[in-house]
Image (spheres, rainbow, N blue to C red):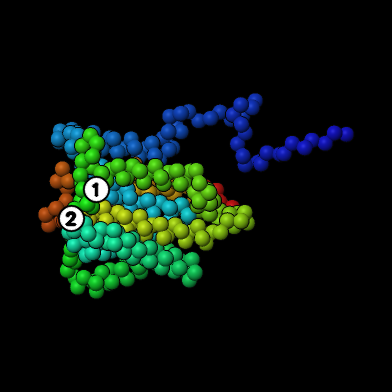
């Protein structure tokens, strides 16, 4: 009697579409509508068209470059946020805004409007941010503090340190080299910060898709037990994600300094929740193990276009301040979360 050695197909695996009787694949249009990157990109284009119709100047090349420049700061800060969320464990880093402010304040103090201390200022600023990331990681992974609680507490710690360090009055300004890097035109009138963002985006996408670190990050976020049994050091992977989150927040803070030239204590406040929104709108699931940075890029652009549209429509300001814009941000995020909340992966 001949015994078949062919492995049985798992009952929850879909059959290959080329086999007789296999279920038909959903139409292309339906698959595209289920892709958060496609949906977010289409929504960003739609909002841009609406803004251009409302104000024709919005469609000019200069305005597009300005819009992408503003989006780049959120995009860079959201790199680390994306990594932390993908790593799972209810991971989230709400301290990125305060960390970005810390980076800008330390850098401006040591640059003080001169190129002489540029390298030292960059190293000190990024070093301070890495310390924040290490403390976050230790609190979450060693002392088992919930990430939401830990990073919220870190906001208070960093903000208090900033007040002690500056006395409530930040000093210094960006080095000319940093200003040139961020706002100086390079090719086709495109500022250097956009080329830097493009380079970082390519690097992060490659890191997530083509390296063992990226594979381990998805494995830990998707099913930490299976990843651990497969030999993955789950603690080290998540530890790295929190440190990288603070590091990229620091990079974003310095880029903001180069754009604004001077620093203030609330420089990075708006990026605390917007970085989460950019990642989630781009398809990074809060449950972990799902998502990617390309979607975060689209999410950052979408939020920037939305904010610009609300501004040219003069929504907000006056006695109401930014409240109307914040309400609309929240509504958009809730809609997106509801739309993609049912697409959570089946977990073991």
Indicate the secondary structure of the residue bearing disc 2.
loop
Left or right of 196 in this view: 234: right
Name the mark on residue 11: none
Q: Is residue 145 above or below residue 85?
A: below
* Depth order, front residue of 146/266: 266
| Quarter assignment of residue 131 | bottom left
91 vs 208: above or below: below
Among numbered discs 1 and 2, the one appearing first in the sequence: 1
Q: Residues within 10 Å of mark 2 (few under 14, many from 20)?
A: some
Residue shown at the point (30%, 42%) measured from the top left: 195
Residue at the image point whose x is 62% and y is 54% from the top: 230
Disc ID at residue 181: 1
Give the x, y percent position of residue 56: 15, 33
The vertical placement of 113 against 333, above or below, is below
Foreground residue among 265 and 50: 265
The percent position of residue 272, horizontal first and vertical second, equals 31, 58
Question: Which residue lies under the disc numbered 2?
Answer: 261
Image point 23% across, 42% down: which residue? Answer: 191
Is the residue marked by circle 1 packed among few (<14), some (14-19), or many (20+) residues within 10 Å?
many
């Amino acid at each position: 009697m001949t015994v078949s050695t062919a492995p049985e197909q798992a009952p929850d695996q879909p059959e290959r579409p080329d086999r007789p009787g296999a279920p038909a694949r959903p139409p292309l249009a339906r698959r595209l509508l289920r892709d958060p990157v496609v949906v977010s990109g289409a929504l960003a284009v739609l909002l841009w068209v609406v803004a251009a119709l409302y104000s024709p100047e919005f469609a000019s090349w200069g305005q597009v470059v300005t819009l992408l420049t503003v989006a780049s700061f959120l995009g860079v800060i959201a790199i680390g946020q994306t990594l932390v969320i993908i790593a799972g464990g209810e991971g989230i880093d709400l301290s990125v805004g305060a960390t970005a402010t810390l980076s800008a304040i330390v850098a401006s103090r040591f640059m003080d409007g001169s190129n002489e201390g540029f390298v030292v200022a960059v190293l000190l600023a990024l070093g301070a941010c890495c310390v924040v990331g290490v403390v976050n990681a230790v609190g979450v992974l060693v002392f088992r503090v919930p990430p939401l609680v830990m990073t919220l507490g870190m906001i208070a710690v960093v903000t208090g340190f900033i007040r002690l360090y500056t006395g409530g009055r930040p000093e210094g300004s960006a080095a000319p080299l940093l200003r040139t890097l961020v706002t100086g035109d390079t090719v086709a009138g495109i500022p250097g910060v956009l080329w830097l963002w493009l380079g970082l985006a390519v690097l992060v996408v490659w890191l997530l898709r083509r390296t063992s670190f990226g594979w381990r990050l998805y494995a830990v976020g998707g099913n930490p037990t299976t990843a651990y049994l497969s030999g993955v050091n789950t603690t080290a992977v998540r530890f790295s994600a929190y440190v990288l989150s603070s590091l990229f927040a620091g990079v974003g803070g310095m880029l903001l300094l180069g754009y604004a030239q001077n620093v203030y204590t609330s420089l990075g406040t708006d990026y605390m929740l917007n970085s989460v929104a950019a990642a989630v709108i781009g398809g990074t699931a809060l449950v972990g193990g799902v998502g990617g940075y390309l979607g975060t890029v689209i999410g950052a652009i979408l939020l920037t276009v939305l904010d610009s549209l609300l501004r040219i429509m003069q929504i907000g300001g006056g006695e109401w301040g930014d409240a109307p814009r914040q309400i609309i941000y929240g509504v958009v995020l809730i809609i997106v979360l509801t739309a993609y909340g049912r697409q959570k992966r089946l977990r073991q």
